[in-house]
Image: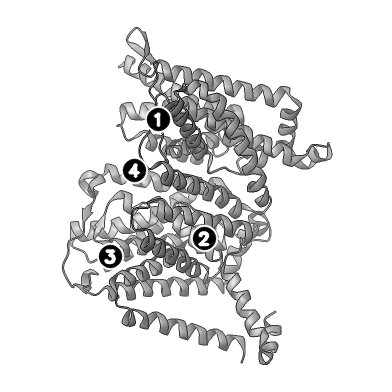
Amino acid sequence: MNSRYGVRIWLGVLIAFAIVLPLVVTDRFATDIFIRILLFAFIGVAWNLMGGYAKQLSLGHAAYFGLGAYTSTILEIRYGISPWIGMIAGGGVAALASLPIGALCFRLRGPYFAIATIATAQVLMLLFLKFRDFAWGAEGTTIPNFGDAPLMMQFDEKSSYYYLALGLLALGLAITYRIEHSWMGYYLVAIGEDEDAAEAIGVNAPRVKRDIYMISAFLTALAGTFYVQYIYFIDPATAFSFNISVEAALVCIVGGIGTLWGPVVGTVLLETTSALLQSWLGSSAGGVQLTVYSLILIAVILWRPSGLLGVFEDAYRRIVRARPASTEEAVLDG
Amino acid sequence: MLETLAQAVINGLLIGGIYALVSIGVTLIFGVVKIVNFAQGEFVMIGMYITFFLANRFGIDPLVSLAVSIPVLFVIGMLVQHFLIRRVLGLGDMPQIFLTFALSLLLMNVALLLFTANYRTVHTAYSDESIHLGALYVPVAKLIAFALAMAFSGILWLFLHLTDLGKAMRAAAQNPDVAMLMGINPHRVFAVAFGAALALAGAAGSLLMPFYPASPMAGQVFVLMAFVAVVLGTLGNVTGALVASLMMGIAESLGIQFVGADSGLIVVFLMLLLTLAFRPSGLAGGRAR
């Protein structure tokens, strides 16, 4: 059994599991958690392209989440355009917005890049608070409910939202996989390791960073549209919430920054923890979730900065290696 | 019109003094330890709660509680440096950014659990007093805060330039390797720098209490202001951070006065983005990192 084959089997099992899950577990509360996991994993995947591979640590991805959410909502309510089209349009708006934002923020490196991205998301939120006539200001608006209208991205069944989110995540992972195995992927990693050295060997760093920022922004905006369609409500505080920016980065770091499956592992761990805390403590304990998140984050950074995915991989390898038949494979892997 | 303008400038300048205490801390840590402390605002918040509880339980005046908040935060700073920051030095941007960022989240949410989201205020005899200068008025509490903030900044400057430890700190900031060869223990210097920066944040917390409510999120505004001021004043430059903070206080106040009550932050963020566009190395020149 070679390892490629093994990976395919595991992937098949995982896909089958993801497809069957909502058919077996029909509880609305549980489905809601699954959808959150898929959505935040997808946002994490989008963040990871830029923050993980190229190590451009953005703390302002809510900017693109919000732009995606507002574009599709404005198109739907003002012009009656289906959110399916609005979703793509929102991605386009976000990708375009990433150009000037990137041009400014990429002038700074490291922590100050992160701060500049926080500022851009905050400016957008404050601007949308001001757009009262055009974008409903601070009160926000509810999304008109058409009942079961798949053409307007509205479904009676929660499982439909689940499959839509699953599709988004699959799209994000497929794009990541393609980029990982292309020249662009190598450029990104080189920039992440040492930007000056990458430029010295001929990587056009500004261009690569610009391109990956556009892709990342585009994908994040899709998540924004999905989210407002799912909760039927939009306001600047929700759409440009700093928590979105934070969670996007958090799931990647906890799971494994700059790895294909890191954001997924991170989201499953964090969202499951959060759901358990909520069912134990109720909604009364406001600060508990983020307290636990930050403790997990501190622990991961101090003891396993490459993320917890590696811990699982090591454990898996140890189990595989323990079986004599697989020794050869382990050697080939190493 | 002119009076409104002058009044806005006075208000901005006075609050700018507090911003300066926070910014100087951020820039000091960045200059010496080479990390950005995302949790700086939360230490202001801790200073505020210390002051609030001393006033509430024991009736101690916020200005007297400076004698508690400054040393307590100094010790917290040394401990944070020793047990947390030291472990991620030299590990690259990701662990450094997200360690202090996680610390910020942690402190904010622990404060939320312990003290709830309620605003806590301390009322002093001078909280509502103000000095009238013609048509202008200068609130006494803010004036005291500004004067003491400038005094603390001055003391820090003297410390950095006149004492051996201060000189060692500046040497370590300029070139840690050479400083080490000269017999300077970097970890001691880093711990003192972190302690001093947090002591300033603690002082800012105490000085704010007579006119500014404490809440778990109270530090956020100050740290955002500080980040912008630190970029504006050239990273790692203490005097630059001071001047930029005062400018930002004035810019925010003018924004509130002439654009709208909720526009102070927009003005400040736009200043950051414009600085990045036209003067990325900061107003004091030098290298942008």
Give me the disc on residue A230: 3
Q: Position of residue A127 (x, y in %)?
A: 32, 43
Amino acid type, label 4: Leu
Q: Position of residue B160 (x, y in %)?
A: 69, 26
Relative to A58, A87 lies left or right: left
Circle 4 is placed at which residue position? A126
- Residue drawn at the location 55% of the way across and 52% of the way down: B98
Relative to B189, A60 lies left or right: left
**Which quarter of the figure has residue B8?**
top left
- Seen from the viewer's position, the closer of residues B203 and B19 is B203
Q: Residue pushed farthest front?
A: B58
**Which quarter of the figure has residue B220?**
top left
Circle 1 is placed at which residue position? B252
What is the CA distance from the residue labelled 3 to the residue labelled 2?
26 Å
- On-image quarter of the C terminus of chain A: bottom right
Amino acid type, label 1: Glu
Foreground mark, 1 or 3? 3
Question: Nearer the N terminus, badge 4 or badge 3?
Answer: 4
